[in-house]
Image: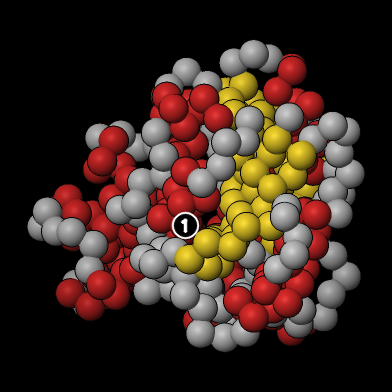
Amino acid sequence: MKVAITIPCRNEEKYIIQCVQSVLASKTNNIEIQVIVCDGKSTDATLLLLEEHYQRDTRVKILINESQFTPQALNLGIRSTDADFVMILGAHSVISIDYIQKCVDAFSIDLSIGCTGGLLINKHEDSIAANVSYCMSSTFGVGSAHFRTGTKNGFVDTVAFGVYKKEVFEKAGLFDEDLIRNQDDEFNYRVVQSGFKIYLLTDTYIEYFVRSSFKKLWNQYLQYGYWKVYVNKKHKAVTSMRQLVPILWVCYLFSLLVFRLFVPGLKLTLVATIPLLLYFFMGIFFATKRDITFKDSLQRIYIYAILHTSYGWGYVKGILNFILLNKKPGKKSTQLTR
């Protein structure tokens, strides 16, 4: 049995070696591991480091992704292997030692399972990243994203870094190369639509190093919301209900602003501001659940606002561009946010 792990990569000199090493250190029974790093023409020391560490290691294959985008890298890796299973993995990640084995074993639970995956645990390198990590693991921050907040094994609509049966790609196709963001969510939607199930394991995990910049976090979630509309338009369906919450929040904020600017004689009633007050108090509650400093509490409240408002605003822009104006994604929306 063979499992191929395909890793999209560009300018990841800080993380790529520990990522690959974590895969090669996996404890498996009768599973052959192949690592396929698809590098998007890195301009830092990424390729040099890979060659220094793995030039003579037959388990590691290094491919050049000419397009430099993630879905093309994933498809490049998938096409280059004859493995029984293919796992996708981000270069900013480190997998637990039993991740591959447990994911492969889980396919025996139900023959209809086409994808398995574990929990995503956010890691941090400074105080801002620590608070971003906390908020992205909170139900208030990310809603019912079970691969972040799940507490029990079971069937879900998506996982972060899945292991797939090879027949999944034969039936559902490959990753959509039009999508710079949300390509994994969109693919998992097609996996389910093709008759397969996705199974989450909560007793194994992947550690993911989160952004330590408010601006980069804003841009990241802005792109998530923006590209989600593009996915919805392609499938002519809302792929998950939780994606609608941020846009409702942004529309509410916009309505308050309109009343204040254009109806100056009309005072906002207490009823109109209840959602805003409720949001503020919920932010305080979820931000201060643990014994932390006042500064950290304020940062967490701010991060919650970034997550929800940027995603919602991106969704609004997506509706305007893709639905109302029938435009294609602009060049700026394809820029990486790291």
Q: Quadrant of residue 280?
A: bottom right
Q: Nearer the viewer, residue 26 or 229?
A: 26
Q: Residues within 10 Å of mark 1 (few under 14, many from 20)?
A: many
101 left or right of 168 in image: right
Q: Which residue is mark 1?
A: 73
Q: Residue furthest top?
A: 111
Answer whether residue 66 is visible to the viewer in this image.
yes
Image point (42%, 24%), residue name: 171
**Secondary structure beneath label 1:** helix
Instruction: Give residue 122's position: percent from left, percent from top.
Output: 72, 62
Instruction: Give residue 286's position: percent from left, percent from top.
Output: 71, 60
Image point (57%, 36%), residue name: 82
Q: Quadrant of residue 151?
A: top right
Location of the N terminus by quadrant is top right
Q: Nearer the viewer, residue 53 or 156?
A: 53
Instruction: Give residue 217's position: percent from left, percent from top.
Output: 53, 73
23 left or right of 177 in image: right
Instruction: Give residue 92's position: percent from left, percent from top.
Output: 66, 66
Image point (80%, 58%), residue name: 22
Image point (69%, 48%), residue name: 34
Question: What's under tag 1, amino acid-wise?
Answer: Ala
Examine the rendered structure and indicate whether residue 76 appears above or below residue 199. Answer: below
Q: Quadrant of residue 315?
A: bottom left
